[in-house]
Amino acid sequence: EAQVTQNPRYLITVTGKKLTVTCSQNMNHEYMSWYRQDPGLGLRQIYYSMNVEVTDKGDVPEGYKVSRKEKRNFPLILESPSPNQTSLYFCASSSAPTVYNEQFFGPGTRLTVL
Amino acid sequence: AQSVAQPEDQVNVAEGNPLTVKCTYSVSGNPYLFWYVQYPNRGLQFLLKYITGDNLVKGSYGFEAEFNKSQTSFHLKKPSALVSDSALYFCAVRPISGSARQLTFGSGTQLTVLP
């Protein structure tokens, strides 16, 4: 089954404790992206990647890191989480050409930073 | 900078009645337009998109949307609502001349279909 998987689905952590949210897709998509969803704000892009070893900042990259060492994986790293990063996070992927192809979304990771 | 407005946070409609979820956009040049749906505890799912051609686009689950360039709108419609259509709906826009990353989402509209 074609899908985007994220782990963990739920995470409660404390300020400053480094964490990684994994994302994997099995559709051989070139493009991957991370979003955060907050009430009343819709989805805002954190980082995206056009292909292996190619990443770039989205609209709200502060406090986040990503890597794309393999085509299928795109982990999101919070090196020192803060309470304002409490949010619902989605990973998404898309095939080329990405400008008009739809994105496939993972199930989401609900993160709480205390 | 582009933007998407979904003027209604909440839309309630009775089962069997037609539904409309509104979306207006602002973008430089011509747009690609998308609708996504989010069911509780799930990721977003693609519903339909407008790229070019016919202004009326048909998508999944009986939904359709009409692109209106003069009004810069892309309203989502369905002739007869089902209780199972209750979900959060997002409109998104990307300029044709833009980069892959320039996909902007609206704030979402919660649709509730009442039995």
Image: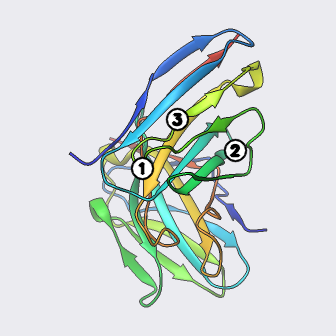
Residue type, numbered disc 3:
Pro
> In this rendering, is residue A91 above or below A27?
above
The residue indicated by pointer 3 is A75
Tags 2 and 3 both on a single chain: yes
Cα–Cα span, label 3 and label 1 = 11 Å
Q: Which chain carries label 1?
A: A
Q: Which residue is nearer to you in this view: A16 or A69? A: A69
Q: Locate residue A32, reporting x and y percent.
A: 50, 51
The residue indicated by pointer 2 is A41
Asked which quadrant contains residue B25, the reply is bottom right
> In this rendering, is residue A102 above or below A16?
below
Cα–Cα span, label 2 and label 3 = 23 Å
The residue indicated by pointer 1 is A71
Asked if residue A55 lies left or right of residue A97, the reply is right
For marks 2 and 1 on the same chain, the one whose residue lies earlier in the sequence: 2
Which residue is painted at 67% across and 57% down in the image? B7
Residue type, numbered disc 1:
Lys
Asked if residue A42 lies left or right of residue B78, the reply is right
Residue type, numbered disc 2:
Leu
